[in-house]
Image: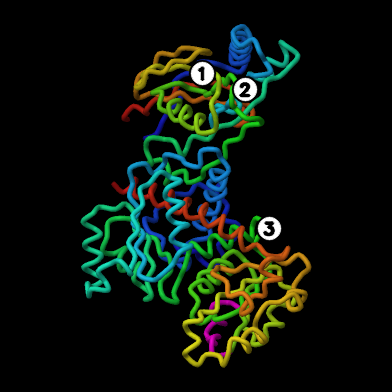
Amino acid sequence: MSLIAKATILDSDAMRRIVRRMAGEILESERDLAELMLIGIRTRGVPLAEQLAAEILAQEGRAPAIGTLDITLYRDDLSLVAPKPVVRESHFPAPIEGRTLVLCDDVLYTGRTVRAALDALLDFGRPKAVRLAVLIDRGWRELPIHADYVGRKVPTSASEVIKVSFEESDGAAEVQILDRKPDA
Amino acid sequence: MSAAAGTPVSGDLSIPFRWRRKDLLGIAELSVQEIGAVLAAAESFAEVALRPVKKVPTLRGKTVVNLFFEPSTRTRVSFEIAAQRLSADVVNFSVASSSQSKGETLRDTTRNIASMFPDFVVVRHAHHGVPAMLARELDCGVINAGDGSHEHPTQALLDAMTIRHRKGRIEGLTVAMVGDIAHSRVARSNIHLLTRLGARVRVAGPRTMLPREMAALGVEVCYRVEDALDGADVIMMLRLQLERQRSVLFPSLGEYAALFGLDAKRLALARPDAIVLHPGPMNRGVEIASEVADGGHSAILEQVGQGVAVRMAVLYLLAGAREERS
């Protein structure tokens, strides 16, 4: 299946403004920065967590801790193992016990990644609370999961793909909608 | 998918790569990239052992049958822990308690096991080729846990992981393997793996245990242990199979220890930062002196720890390939 770019929904300026707003919202509700930890879900959740932390630093003069979570071993289907056999480590700079965690991911879709992430997190300890921050919420949930901090809600069709690129991981910052190539 | 001559030895996983194998029968058929994939996955699984909850749900609902026709404790336990840390269910089927002693043929045993629908069979057998036969007959994934003097692939993979941890690399290292090379599946698997990853391998042992054809595998054959140890980065001592002492391969344990045992004096011939490996169980005072086994150069207990991570990685990768086929 080949995909073509249908539209660019966010450019780098728009992404920066959205991240700035999300950081402000996180600061508004999570008052205790010392106990806050942003957790990026690999792969594209990691740069989002880093950007949110940088924004919080800019606004508050202090940065929250950042962790990374690999959920490969917690997925509910093994069909992704063969094409991507590499499992990467999860890393937390401090125990997650008793902290408020904000899980960060680029796109919220079926909710299955978040379900896996919650299972993975709970094996590392018992956080006080877990919130969810996503840059794009594209709908089509298959599980009762919702995000606490949303960058942009984007209505999509099931055939479409949301592609989020970050400067750090992809060399350019933008969000695109891709779709199947119409049959020629 | 075997490694072509001239394949780069880095095992670079940044190149898009698919794991397609349903069975792990030996190192001989693995490409450098496949070896790299197992070692890379094992690194991540090593971390699971350090967690408060030493278990991930990856293989929930899968069944692993440990089918051991030869006595083994550590390999079986290592596979058992690996499967359990991935949340699989494990059944142990060993020869002492099995029907083989009642005259059942291997094929019938295999068919009986197949009708219980396992997802993996981990097999050890005194004859080489049994895991390959099982892999042909069974739909499930088959892992060779040692077949005759043929191969013991997970042992070689865990040795490689231990060497990489201690030395940071394998390419360019000099590895001395000492003992009963002819009858050792550990030696054979390690020779395939280490030469493929670019190490220089020397083997040493009594002439009766050192087939001349070894040179064809790309290793240097030494008849004096001192020649093999000289300047080595890694020393692999093989277990002397005492059950073979009855055959006439060597005159006495004392003579074997005197001529081929690794003590502090011989260890001093290797590089000052050399590491010592042993697949276990050790015969202290025969192939290895206690001062070496328990000394600062020894990485023997580390090997055991890496064994679990390597076996988790193998189960995980094979499970993925099975999922793709179905």
Label tally: 3
Where, quadrant-wise, is the N terminus of chain B in this rendering?
bottom left
- Whether residue B43 is visible to the viewer of this picture, yes or no, is yes
Q: Is residue B225 magenta?
A: no
- Residue A132: numbered disc: 1
- Residue B152: numbered disc: none
User: Residue beneath label 3, please?
Assistant: B166
Quarter where residue B57 is shown: top left
**Label 2: few (<14), some or many (≥20) within 10 Å?**
many
**Pair 2/1: label in front:** 2
- Residue A37: numbered disc: 2
Q: Choose the circle earlier in sequence order: 2 or 1.
A: 2
Check the image and report above or below for A37 versus B78.
above
Scheme by which the image is coloured: rainbow
In front here: A128 or B114? A128
Q: Chain of mark 3?
A: B
Give percent across and percent down for residue A35: 65, 19
Identify the residue shown where x is 47% and y is 43%: A84
Boundaries of the magenta span: B207-219
Check the image and report above or below for A129 versus B183.
above
Q: Is residue B94 left or right of residue B302?
A: left
Q: Amino acid at mark 1?
A: Leu
Secondary structure under badge 3?
A: helix
